[in-house]
Image (cartoon, rainbow, N blue to C red):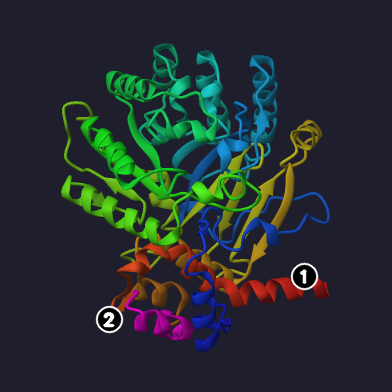
Amino acid sequence: MLTNRVKTLLPEEVQRQLEKNLFRHQINKVLHGHPSPMYWKAPNEGVVLKKPEGTWKSRRVNFYIGIPYCIPTDPPHCGFCLFPTEKYTGKDAMNTYLDHLEMEATQYVDFYEGASLESIYVGGGTPNLLAPESYARLLEIARKIFPNMNDSIEKTLEGIPQLFNEAKVKAIRDAGFNRVSMGVQQMNDKLIKHSGRRQTRRQIFEAISLFHKYSLACNLDLIYGWPEQTVEDMLQDLRDAVDLGVRHITHYELNIGGRSDFSTARKDLVANVPTKIAMYQEAKNFLTESGYIRRTVYDWEKPEPNEKFSFAGAEKYSYENNLRELLKVEADSSITTNSMGAIGYAAINNHFGGPNTAEPATAMMNHKSLSKYYEDTENGRLPVERMFRLGLNDVKLTWIFQCSQEMKISKTQYRKIFDDCLYKEYRNIWSVLEERNWIRNTEEEIQFINEGEFYIPTIQALLSKARLEEISLASKLA
């Protein structure tokens, strides 16, 4: 078992950081775990794949396929999105991209031999830009890597309302997908104009009707804290989602960061932090009263079937649920790992060998330049732009980040996985949060309560700050 002493902030530093950030807009820190890709470095030479130590029997893979293209909007990137994308120029460009995606896939065949594929997620970008005949090809590419793919696993495709039509939805289902993640943002026709999308409330309703017709589970992504959005606007969107029978609602705070339009030109139109806290609480109360169970701080599930989505499991989101259990102690005391494999433009790979291995984890990010992605795949090279080898303390933080999304962290699991005490290692931070009544420390777990739920991204930043300073210093000295 590797052992590293965790470095953390002093209590007065924790207080100072909290006071500094209480009224600042948050950015979701867990999108790529820890550390952020900004701390990763370009590989010195070509990346050579090496299976993690041990057998693959205890290793599960959740696989992401990235699509680079988006429809241009004014403002760019829907006003707030910080993900890299490319402008969509037509079917020929998409087919060229799929050819290169297949080239990259062939390089992973040996690496994943014997792995257990648990779920597939096709994201972007905007995957439902693809023509109907291309959806089957996506899963054929995945089968090149995982020839023994179980047809019953969750296979999700992401999309936006205005691009779904019956031909596409039928093709998505016929290809083997069984779930859709629809990025709605806002149902209100006036408010959606802030993102530059040509999307209507009617298109959302029509898309959900098609998902019902073709027995596709779905979740809706809705955002609160949007420019000019009122509490009543937010609640109306949630009422509509409930009335439509949607059994998984992802309701998250608007991320405001970088030089996006929402963080600059429209900053004064965005709800301030106290208003967003009030919106969070109103949404929590409404969804709870509507029979939804909160799976994470932003994911809501309704287990009971309804006449529109009556099939079992329509509320589940296995891809994200699995990634939150990246290290899990089983009944026989073995440790199961849930890694994130990925191919495609700007795709992120996270492979966890486990805390008792020489290299606990490796993270890799593919090129954000499409031309460089093409160049590497055409020459038989992995198209990796940057990577990071996680030490034990980085794996601890990644595990804590993922667990905290469920508003609780198991002290028992932490002890069994890392052979350390979760509370003791980060005592300076937990003690300050206890004083604020943001967490509850029980014998079995640390629970996020009251405003501590809302401020989980800020708390994640506190937990990782000292370690990120170490990484930055090491990089300067290298």
Q: Is residue 437 magenta?
A: yes
Which span of residues is magenta-colored?
422-438
Up/down of 456 relative to 375, above or below: below
Q: Residues within 10 Å of mark 1 (few under 14, many from 20)?
A: few
Q: Which residue is mark 2?
A: 443
Label 2's element? loop
Q: Residue at x 58, y 42 (%)?
A: 342
State whether the magenta stretch is mostly helix, strand or loop: helix
Instruction: Indicate which disc residue 349 carries.
Output: none
Viewer-closest of 122 and 60: 122
**In the figure, residue 333 lies in which quadrant?**
bottom left
Residue 413: % across, % down: 37, 71
Up/down of 300 relative to 180, above or below: below
> Looking at this rendering, what residue extends furthest in the top direction?
167
Q: Residues within 10 Å of mark 2 (few under 14, many from 20)?
A: few
Q: Is residue 197 left or right of residue 244?
A: right
Viewer-closest of 429 and 53: 429
Residue 226: % across, % down: 45, 44
Q: Amino acid at mark 1?
A: Ser
Q: Quadrant of the C terminus?
A: bottom right
Q: Residue at x 60, y 37 (%)?
A: 77
- Residue 129 visible: yes
Q: Which residue is mark 1?
A: 475
Up/down of 239 relative to 90, above or below: below
> Looking at this rendering, what residue extends furthest in the front direction?
268
Q: Residue at x 37, y 32 (%)?
A: 187
Q: Is residue 420 left or right of residue 472?
A: left
